[in-house]
Amino acid sequence: MLEPSARLLDLLELLQARPLTTGREIADRLEIDRRTVRRYVAALQELGIPVEGQRGVGGGYRMRPGFRLPPLMLTEDEAVAVVLGLLAAERLGADVEEALVKLHRVLPDALRRRVEALEATLAFTEAAPSAAPVRGDTALRLAEAIRRRRRVRVRYRTFAGEESERELSPHGLVVHSGRWYLAAFDHGRADLRTFRVDRMARAAVADEPAVVPPDGFDAVAEVSRSLARVPWKWEVEVLLDLPLDQAAERIPATLAELIEAEDGTLLRMRVGSLDWMAEVLAGLDCPFTIRRPDELRASVRELAERLVASVA
């Protein structure tokens, strides 16, 4: 449910975007009745914004022709930062089209033309991740609950498609490879869990206080550990002849769990392909000892034979 101030801003945007808007269209868009529409229009008029009403068939509300809100006074550096942020957010799955339209509308003409040129010519060297967009209201409610230390209630859909109601104490939001994750204490499971935010619906901030996270809790580390434990077909355990800090530089925390051992670093992973795992190990450029599974030894041996054959 939108707050009155948010509805006023939505009404202002609607009136600026269309030459004429009917009372019914406004009511449907803002989820209010016709009487409230008239009250909001009057509120804008009291603020000095020239909203005109036309009665009868084909009538409605419009902004007085020629009226424009004062330009958004951004410096060139600030405009570049805003546009770059929006374009980067788009690569993470955010719908930024309307935000860019609004930005263009309030920028001074000369700066707007430069901003449009930047949008048309800017390119990124890295491919965009396969992003999973999230609802803005869901992300904002989760962030509010984290800051206020309140529980949230959500409808959650698992990877298998099963849906359930969850009561969570949210601890942190993390974005990884275009997907949003929530690290939270699941009261129904009595355990720390990681949730995909794009699979959440009907998020609501509750009045009950959230469970306090463990001392030294790090949401990024928790989500990384959770992703590294995704239950793929094979459970891999390899002892690397590397100190822990060097192993961490070569292997992302989201890919594997690394544990300091007396004679190196113990790597634990879950993978779907042992041939792929063999390539990962070959790329680490260090001696290693396979502990499990035995089938991984055959994959490493076959990779070595292929490499020798290619050199020959």
Image (cartoon, rainbow, N blue to C red):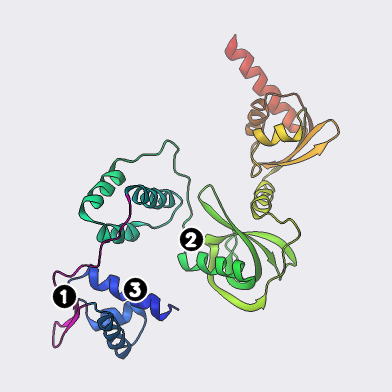
Q: Answer above or below: position of 205 versus 213.
A: below
| Residue drawn 76% across the image and 31% down it | 243
| Secondary structure found at label 3 | helix
Note whether residue 292 is visible. Answer: no
Instruction: Determine if the magenta segment contains residue 73.
Output: yes
Q: Is residue 89 magenta?
A: no
Distance between mark 3 and mark 2 Cα atoms: 22 Å
Residue sticking out furthest to the right: 262
Name the amino acid, label 1: Arg
User: Which residue is rendered at x = 33% and y = 55% of the image?
Assistant: 74
Q: Quadrant of the C terminus?
A: top right
- N-terminal of the two: label 3 or label 2? 3
Residue 283's x, y, as percent?
64, 26
Residue nearest the observer in this picture, 40 or 309: 40
User: On the image, numbered disc 3 is attached to which residue?
Assistant: 9
Residue 134, numbered label: 2
Where residue 264 sits in the image (x, y, percent)?
Answer: 80, 31
Category of crowding for the residue at label 1, using alpha-carbon neighbours closer than 10 angstroms: few (below 14), some (14–19), many (at least 20): some
Q: Is residue 233 above or below residue 196?
A: above
Q: Magenta region: which residues?
A: 50-75
Circle 1 residue: 64
**Residue type, label 3:** Leu
How many numbered markers are drawn?
A: 3
- Could you tell which of marks 1 and 2 lies nearer the N-terminus? 1
Earlier in the chain: of badge 1 and badge 3, it is: 3
Callout 2 secondary element? loop
